[in-house]
Amino acid sequence: MAAEWRKALRALALTALAVVWVGCAPEHYPQSIFGPVTDFGVRINSLFTGIFWWTMLVLVIVESALIYILIRYRNRPGAEPRKVYGNNLAEIGWTVGPTLIVVFILVPTIRTIFYTYEPPESEPLVVEAVGHQWWWEFRYPELGVTTANELHLPVGRPIEVRLSSVDVIHNFWVPRLGGKRYNIPEPARAPDEPEGRNYNVLYFTVEEPGEYLGQCAEFCGTSHALMRMRVVAQSAEDFQAWVGAMTDTTRAVPGAVATAATAAPDTQSLEARGYQVFLRTGCTACHSITGTPAAGQLGPNLTRIGSRWAIGAGLLENNEENLARWIRNASALKPAAKMPPFPNLSDEDLQALVAYLSSLK
Ligand code: CUA
């Protein structure tokens, strides 16, 4: 009998351990808050852990007292109820007790709030994260870079994310970085009102290179659940290389470099034909590509679109087949997407366009 009990206990302990292990393993839950990679995330997490254990202590004390009292003062023949009304000691006890509990929660919480709003000591890298229905725009004003849905950040340098929106309220949330915080559309300002800061900010330093998934955390319309993003945290050198590639104006026009060298413009390749389709089909009204005349501001910036992990803000794997489906009819894949369908684009033109966009790496 004893051996069976031991076996059962061991199985139970292993199961509990497995549950804890899975719960702690961020690779199983890429959007878990339990694997913070920023100072911000670590602070929030330790606040949570601290409060969790305080409340567990309260639970044990209250439940023990309850069980003791239920047994000790259970109904017995001849027992009389005892009145404690007007007992000063008891009154003071159950006023002071909960007050102390609230103080133990309040003090670390307020300290953490102040910590997360404190600007970093060294100059942060400023990133503007702009919410759109339903995708993310990321601008680096100091670097002259704009991209979409994929936020590249250097590890070890403080980041200042300025959160805003062009339409409705969105919410920037990359659980492993910490957060979440609102993207609020710019409020109307009276003409005589002085310009002030009118956006939310998030300060953090990413400590660990890696790729972290995030998504909009405020219901913002039909495709709210399809408003995802990916953060690529990389070493300072890799980040510089990325910035260099993003600002390289020679990449986007097929054969541009060869043209300068050979004086023979490339008009024959599929990519070169795709580039012409891109220019004449109206794509440039909404999209920008660094190094081309395309300077539209309404849709995602497509500079180096071919290197991004997904299309449609995390909706589909980034491959030629999906890109063609997306261009043909985006709102069939993503409800209410603002990109218009292109039913009249010939299959040849579509294929060339997809080849051009995929070549932007
Ligand atoms: Cu944007 Cu939900």
Image: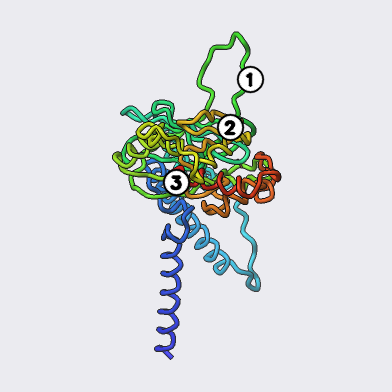
Disc 1 packing (10 Å; few <14; some 14–19; many ≥20): few
Q: Secondary structure at mark 3?
A: helix
Which marked residue is nearer to the observer: mark 1 or mark 2?
2
Q: Secondary structure at mark 2?
A: helix
Left or right: 271 as drawn, with respect to 36:
right
**Quick one: 23 or 67, which is closer to the camera?**
23
**Quick one: 115 or 170, which is closer to the camera?**
170
**Quick one: 326 or 82, which is closer to the camera?**
326
Circle 2 is placed at which residue position?
A: 284
Q: Secondary structure at mark 1?
A: loop
Which marked residue is nearer to the observer: mark 3 or mark 1?
3
Amino acid marked by disc 1: Ala
Q: Residue at x 65, y 73 (%)?
A: 77
Amino acid marked by disc 3: Ser
Circle 3 is placed at which residue position?
A: 307
- Could one spot residue 96 in this view of the protein? no
On-image quarter of the N terminus: bottom left
Circle 1 is placed at which residue position?
A: 188
Q: Position of residue 62 (x, y in %)?
A: 52, 57
- Could one spot residue 30 in this view of the protein? yes
Mark-to-mark CA distance, 1 and 2: 29 Å
Above-or-below relation of 276 to 223: above
1 or 2: tag closer to the N-terminus:
1
On-image quarter of the C terminus: top left
Mark-to-mark CA distance, 3 and 1: 37 Å
Is ligand 1 within 8 Å of the beta carbon of the residue shown at mark 2?
Answer: no
Q: Position of residue 38 (x, y in %)?
A: 38, 43
